[in-house]
Image (tube, coloured by chain):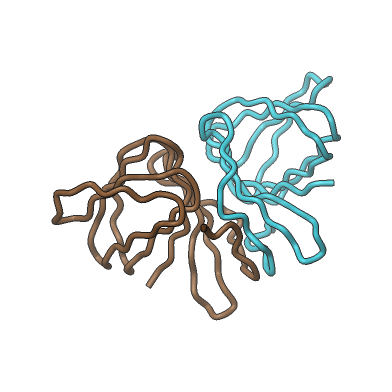
Chain colours: A cyan, B brown
Amino acid sequence: MTTETLAGVSVTTRANVYFDGKCVSHTLAFPDGTKKSVGVILPATLTFNTGAPEIMECVGGSCEYKLAGTSEWKKSGVGEKFSVPGNTSFEIRVTEPYHYICHFG
Amino acid sequence: MTTETLAGVSVTTRANVYFDGKCVSHTLAFPDGTKKSVGVILPATLTFNTGAPEIMECVGGSCEYKLAGTSEWKKSGVGEKFSVPGNTSFEIRVTEPYHYICHFG
């Protein structure tokens, strides 16, 4: 099971482009004020810094990730989620496009 | 003036990835059943084929485009739109990320 659509949202039309386009996302605002983003990471190994805590939900493809301070790469595939604490970083390694929903807070 | 947000939509969470990621978009469905997409084209020169007619609205950056059967490159910047007939093609030339809304039909 995965989340194929998110309804009743307001989309920021301008994309967020990171790492020369290896990661592209669009920001979504919900009626209750919460924000999420939907995006894709193309084949690459990237390091992301978090502000707020994040939950990354895979909706297509897969990735491997490694949280700061850990030494183990873990896999996350369709329908799976992983949590990243706030104010830290994580590495992500992608060999096929990894489609995700990023839940904040 | 540009369209910064689109409200009350249902977003398909999986991205559309074209040309090895040189173009990434997300599909939006409106309550009346119409669909649009929001996307970004990274620096490249690409040829797109249309099914339905499209209106491309620039919401960030700029592009140059050339419709099939014409010889003139035209520029489209923020707040500007161009129309492409159905069942044809157009070339697009981008030197800075071109953020767009694609209106169909």
In which image quadrant can residue A67 be found? top right
Q: Residue at x 31, y 63 (%)?
A: B83
x%, y% of residue A33? 80, 60
- Does any portion of residue B24 appear in the rendered image? no
Relative depth, front residue between A22 and B5: B5
The number of numbered badges drawn on the structure is 0
The reply, left or right, for residue A19 in relation to residue B75 is right
* Residue farthest along the bottom direction in this orientation: B32
Give the residue at x 70% y 34%: A75
Rendered position, B103 above or below A93: below
Q: Position of residue B75 (x, y in %)?
A: 31, 48
Taking the image as drawn, is residue B88 in sight?
A: yes
Q: Residue at x 84, y 20 (%)?
A: A69
Q: Does residue B102 appear left or right of residue A40 in this picture?
A: left
List x then y, in percent, for residue A88.
82, 27
Q: Work out whether residue A74 or residue B69 is closer to the camera in this orientation and state it.
A: B69
Vertical placement of residue A33 versus A60, above or below: below
Q: Position of residue B24 (x, y in %)?
A: 48, 47
Check the picture and name the quadrant holding the C terminus of chain B: bottom left
Front-most of residues B84 and A8: B84
Name the outermost residue toward the front. B1
In the picture, measured across the screen, residue A80 lies left or right of residue B34, that is: right
